[in-house]
Amino acid sequence: MRGRTIRDLSDAIAPRVLQRSISPWFYKSLLVSPIDDWIVVRARLSHTQLSGTRVIRPALDPAYDALALKRANEFRIAGNFSTGALSLTDSVLLHLLIYKIADGTMALSFAYLDGPGGPQMKYFGCARLSVLKSDGRWEEIKGPESLEGKGWAVRESGVRNSFKLDKVPQHFSSGSPR
């Protein structure tokens, strides 16, 4: 894995989603930056949060698996209310990319719906970025406001949805459809 870039992984990740979630300048720098480690978590979207999280592509360093699972458990998606959906849950992939930088280690995570058309949907929010401090703690680099700083809003083309977590329709927040 070491030494590959986002371009090398473009068949395995959704670069379009990542490109929309970070600045154009930062995205261009990632296109040529070597990735040190890559972790993938699969989960099910239930209401606005992820459940059943499991690592499907483990890290070379197992400590990163725990960080990927933590990010997945904190992640939120709002606005995914499709009239064509047969199920109230969708599969989600969360990618955690680890980079070695001059100051140490950087972790970048982003997620998207892993179903038909999932990577092509319109995602609003921002990827999570953090750096590993000398005391072993991850310090988050704040980006633009998103869903509580930890999520995305998603919309199908031509569909208007509310992107606030407090605007989830009643039948979605009760745990079962009416």
Image (spheres, rainbow, N blue to C red):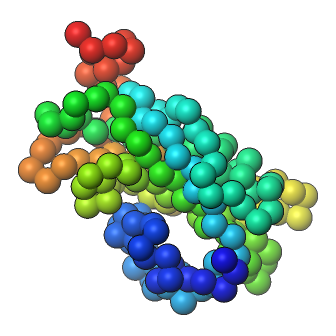
Camera-side residue of 102 and 143: 102
Q: Is residue 40 above or below residue 79?
A: below
* Residue at the extreme left: 158
Can you give x and y, in whole percent of width and height, for residue 158 in the image? 9, 50
- Which residue: 79% across, 75% down? 104
* Residue at the extreme front: 56
Residue 37 picture quarter: bottom right
Can you give x and y, in whole percent of width and height, for residue 25 in the image? 45, 83
- Which residue: 28% across, 39% down? 80
Residue 141, visible in the rendered structure: no
Which quarter of the figure is the N terminus placed in? bottom right
Is residue 127 found left or right of 2 in the rendered image?
A: left
Can you give x and y, in whole percent of width and height, for residue 15 in the image? 40, 71
Can you give x and y, in whole percent of width and height, for residue 128 in the image? 55, 57
Is residue 120 found left or right of 89 in the rendered image?
A: left
Which quarter of the figure is the C terminus placed in? top left
Is residue 85 found left or right of 131 in the rendered image?
A: left
* Residue at the extreme bottom: 32
